Image: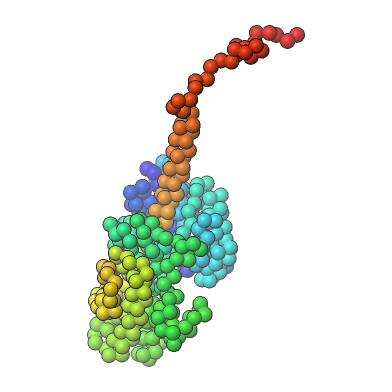
Amino acid sequence: MRHVIALDVGGTGMKAALVGADGALLHEARRATGREHGADAVVENILAFAAELRRVGEERFGVPAEAAGVAVPGIIDAEQGIAVFAANLGWRDVPLRRLLSERIGVPVALGHDVRTGGLAEGRLGAGRGADRFLFLALGTGIAGAIGIDGRVEPGAHGSAGEIGHVVVRPDGPPCGCGQHGCLERLASASAVTEAWAAASGDPEADAADCAKAVDSGDPRAVAVWQQAVGALADGLVTALTLLDPRTLIIGGGLAEAGETLFVPLRAAVEERITFQPLPGIVPAALGDTAGCLGAGLLAWDLLAAAEAATDATGAAIATAREPVPGAPESVPDDRPGTDPRPSTEVST
C-alpha cells in the first residue's frame, strides 16, 4: 500500500503517522522530543523516529514510504527546508529537510505547525469545501493559516498568518515580540489562564477552569472571559476585513470550551462588523491529529508536484520531436562530397 511518513513536532512531544493516499492514518505513534537534553538531541530523536516509521511501513505494507512531511514550530524556511528558529526546542538554522532525507532516503517536505494543521482542517476537516478559510489555533499563543483553494498561503517570507501579533489593545500588556496589546497576550489559552489565576486568587487555575466557572455563573470568570472574547472578536474582524474568508475555523486548547466560547464569540463578531460579510465560525474538527494529517498532505503534495514536473518534461520532449507543420522534410544532401550512405572504406 502506498504511504508517506508524517511527523508533527511539538515543544515536548512528537506525534507521527503513516498516511495513505486517501488521507487515512494507517499507523500512529507518539514520542517525547527530549528537549531537556538539548537541541541536537531533539534533532536526532526526530531522525530516529522517522527511521523507525520507515521500518514499520516496510514491515506492514511491504513497500517503503514514498516521501515524508514534517511540521515544526517556530520560524521556518520551507523552500530551503530549514528550521530557522524555535525557542521551545532550542534550535537555530537546522537543515531538517536534508537531514531527514539523508536518514530515510525519501524526499521530505517541511512545514510550519499551525499552517500544516490548517491545511488538514481546510482539506479534510471543518473547512472542507470552503474555497477561502482562516484557521486559528488558540493555544499558548495564537497563530493562523490562510487557506485558498485547498492550499495554505505562506506569504512572501514564510510568516503569513501571524494574527497573534496583531495589536488589538495598544495600551495592553507587553508581548515577547516587542509590542504591547497583541492578540495572543489577551485571548490565547495562556492569557486566559494568567488572567483567571489572578482574578480567582488560585495560581494553579487555568483556562479550562475559567470556562467551567463561566458555565457556573462566576462573575469574576465571566469578566475574564468577556475580555478575552472581545479581544479575539476585534482581531477576527480585522482578519475578515482583510481576507474575506468563507469560514473561520477555531482550534487549539481554548476552543475545547465549545459553545462557552463559540456562542459569545459569534455574537461579538456579528456586533462589530458593518459592511463585511459574516463568515461561518466553526470549531476545528480534527483535534490533535491535524498536524500529522497536514504533514502527510505536504508529503503527498510533494510527490504530486514531482510527478507533474516529470509529465510536463515528457510532454515537452515529445512536442519537440514532432515535425513542425509546413516545414520542409529533411532529405539526403546529394551534393558532391556529402554522400549520406555509410562509408565502406577501411582505413589501413
Residue 290: quadrant of the picture: bottom left
Give the percent coordinates (x, y) of residue 292: 40, 58
In the image, is 292 to the left or to the right of 46? left
Q: Is residue 89 visible?
A: no
Q: Is residue 1 above or below residue 333?
A: below
Q: Is residue 238 visible?
A: yes
Q: Is residue 32 above or below residue 238?
A: above
Residue 138: quadrant of the picture: bottom left
In the image, is 231 to the left or to the right of 73? left
Q: Nearer the viewer, residue 249 or 139?
A: 249
Q: Tag count in the figure?
A: 0
Residue shown at 43% from the left, 79% from the top: 167
Q: Nearer the viewer, residue 158 or 221?
A: 158
Give the percent coordinates (x, y) of residue 47: 52, 56
For the C terminus, which image quadrant?
top right
Give the percent coordinates (x, y) of residue 218: 27, 89
Q: Nearer the viewer, residue 314 or 82?
A: 314
